[in-house]
Image (tube, rainbow, N blue to C red):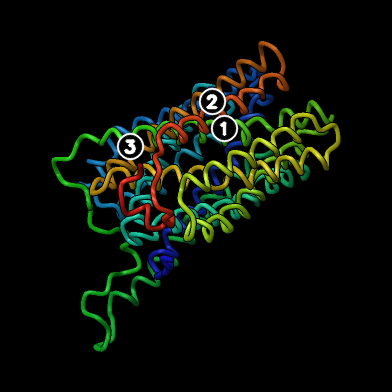
Amino acid sequence: MTKLRRDSATWLIYAQWGVYCYFLYTFTPSVVLIRDDEHISDTLASLHSTAYAAGIVLVGFVGAPLIARVGRDRSMWIAQAVVCLGIVGYVATSIFPVSLGAVLVAGAFGSFLGIGVAASLSDRHGPAGGAALAEANGIASAVGLVAPLAIAASIHLGYGWRPAMVLTLPLVGILGLVAMAVGGRAATPSPSAEPDRPSILDTSTPDSSPADAHRLPPAYWPSWLVVVLCVSLEFCMTLWSPLLAKERLHISSATAATAITAVLAGMSAGRFIGARISERRPIDWILLRSFAVVGAGFAVFWVAGTAWLSYLGLVVCGLGIAMHYPLGVARAIASAPGQTDLASSRMSVASGIAIGGGPFLLAFLADTISVQWAYLLVPVLLLAATTTVLVSRRPAPVMPVAEAAAVPVP
């Protein structure tokens, strides 16, 4: 078993990702709420997620060389600052084109942060990189639990959903101040300290990608497709589950927004549990069983006519969804040894296509038929992901996912 050892820089990376995901999980329910603010259809409202995704795809193509030039650590902090500017643009207006442009900016620079997080944790922790990614996303999901509740509380108090999202700005500021304070002490170590001890502000590790490596191996692309399918599924559940809950259960928009909390509660628990399992079991073993869990939870959510049963189904869905993205990324990075930044960068393209495509297709189907029948897109995505994993694997000795993160995945 490979043990995950967390240093101060690892905790800082976790915090950076957690604060960003607070914004992300206030953004997801806002897509349904901004529909009413701007008096637009479900399809047009979903274009906000498409614009967000377009920014991610753009950075997926140009992110790796830019990060190599600027440095991972610096690019991650710049990204957080620009995401804050995107948030201001998004909440300051109800003009459709302006809000679209703002989320495109937020998505693009959030992608820079995501590339840095995935690459830094993978390189810093080596064989335990898969477990570190799972734990980072578990903490992010735990932080994200607060986001829909903050939106619901803000709406109930009569302020609307926007103040809950704006809370991201002071959180980023506090995180930066804490990091500088701790980094200042680390910059002047005692004489007994190691002379090359890194500052906590430097969360990066040297780029492991060869300078001339511009092509990823064929084994990488099935894992890339798995991430596309799984992220599409995740965002279909987090973006549009409030709408189905609202229509099926006849509840208010504020109450329906908390449906995302049920998904995130399952995801948070699932990622902490999955991080431990991932130290002992192979990636594909965990993925295939997690797909089965999502299928069971979705079936309950789709047919439930009561709030408690519907929310229970969402929690079970979250438990299954929890490990999809971190293990999909670990699977892909492991299939491209020595190309960490490039592999992570192309993962951003996968995420962008998924975030823009899956929820948009579901929203289009919802406008065309109904939300409930449109949601059958989820089991279709689940079946496709299962098939891709089964087709792209081959018999291999049992190996912990943490070790699999350091070698090519079959």
Classify mark 2: residues with Cα within 10 Å, few (<14), some (14-19) or many (20+): many
Residue 106 appears in the picture as rendered: yes
Viewer-side label of 2, 3: 3
**Percent coordinates x, y for residue 2 in the rendering:** 41, 65
Viewer-side label of 3, 1: 3
Please report contact status of discs 2 and 1: CB closer than 8 Å, yes or no: yes
Nearest the viewer among 316 and 139 is 316
Q: CA distance from mark 2 to mark 1?
A: 7 Å
Q: Earlier in the sequence, mark 2 or mark 3?
A: 3
Q: CA distance from mark 2 to mark 3?
A: 22 Å
Residue at the spot of label 3:
220
Asked which quadrant contains residue 235, the reply is top right
**Percent coordinates x, y for residue 307 in the rendering:** 83, 39
Identity, as a three-letter code, of the amino acid under mark 1? Leu
Query: Quick one: SS at disc 3?
Result: helix
Residue at the spot of label 1:
233
Identity, as a three-letter code, of the amino acid under mark 3? Tyr
Please report contact status of discs 2 and 3: CB closer than 8 Å, yes or no: no
Query: Quick one: SS at disc 1?
Result: helix
**Percent coordinates x, y for residue 237 in the rendering:** 63, 34
Figure quadrant of the N terminus:
bottom left
Residue at the spot of label 2:
358
